[in-house]
Amino acid sequence: MENIPILIHDYPVLKRIERHRRKMLCVMLAASVSAHLFCGNARAQQSEPAKPVVVQPGAPGMPSRTLPSSTKATLPPLSKADVEFMQGMIMHHSQAVDMTALIASHTDNKDVRLLGARISHSQSDEIKFMQRWLAARGEPISLAMPGMPDMDMSGHAMGLMPGMLTPEQMEALRKAKGAEFDHLFLTGMIQHHGGALTMVRGLFDTAGAGQDAELFNFATDVDSGQRAEIRIMQTMLEKKLPEEKR
């Protein structure tokens, strides 16, 4: 009986403890339910990928338009000059790669070797790009040039492509060694690059040509890149002249 007064005295405290315990259980339960709902929503969002939003930019001063997600892109219209430029540049680049292929067996000049490797890699990659560009548009890779029987060492038709070396120039390059080869290679490649610049200028001078974004970017890259390489080769030639006079 001695414990009864103590139990009665502590009853309000126990009541408050019980209410606090129940309150904490409710908080924990609510948090658990919220977490479950959040995770469920997150899984639902992950399992249902968002549909793409296609936006068509408006003309200057006009708002953009949201198009249906099923909208498909179409290639811009081509001009005949676009296709002929790419076909002709493939032929043009191919001869440059042929020229660089002679370097390993014809000269030990480190500068010429480094330059040749740079030209070979960049123009080989550009040939692949041009081939893909033409194929994506259902156009033939080769440029039809009737009445042009001359061929270079890779079987490419010669003629009409500005700056390309003649069969006689290519033969002289193949026969040269050492310093003579270096001189013929550098002067020949400067001529070759100059022809590429002429082709780019002809493309942009043609009404309606060069409007395709990929073609425009490629042509401007060719122009800037080959101008830079021409300056490098001119410097190499100027450096060699004083050495040869010693």
Image (spheres, rainbow, N blue to C red):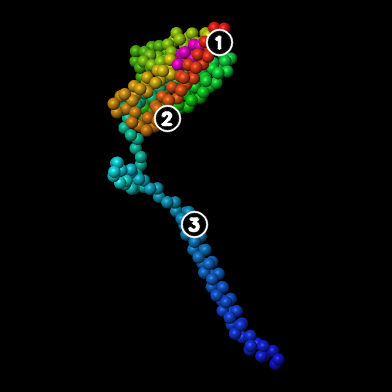
Magenta range:
181-190
Give the left or right position of residue 151, taking residue 4 as reference.
left
Mark 3 and mark 2 in contact? Answer it, CB < 8 Å.
no
Q: Residue at x 47, y 11 (%)?
A: 170
How much space separates mark 1 and mark 3, taking CA atoms? 74 Å
Report the amino acid beneath label 2: Arg
Crowding near the residue tagged with mark 3, few <14, some 14–19, many ≥20 C-alpha atoms within 10 Å? few
Name the image quarter holding the C terminus: top right
Task: Report the residue marked by disc 3.
Answer: 43
Crowding near the residue tagged with mark 2, few <14, some 14–19, many ≥20 C-alpha atoms within 10 Å? some
Q: Residue at x 32, y 46 (%)?
A: 64
Task: Report the residue marked by disc 2.
Answer: 132
Q: Is residue 163 visible?
A: yes
For the residue pair 73 and 2, the one nearer the viewer reads as 2
Report the amino acid beneath label 1: Glu
Q: Tell me, for residue 233, which label it has, or none.
A: none
Above or below for 3 versus 41: below
Picture coordinates of residue 138, whole percent (x, y): 36, 30
Task: Report the residue marked by disc 1.
Answer: 243
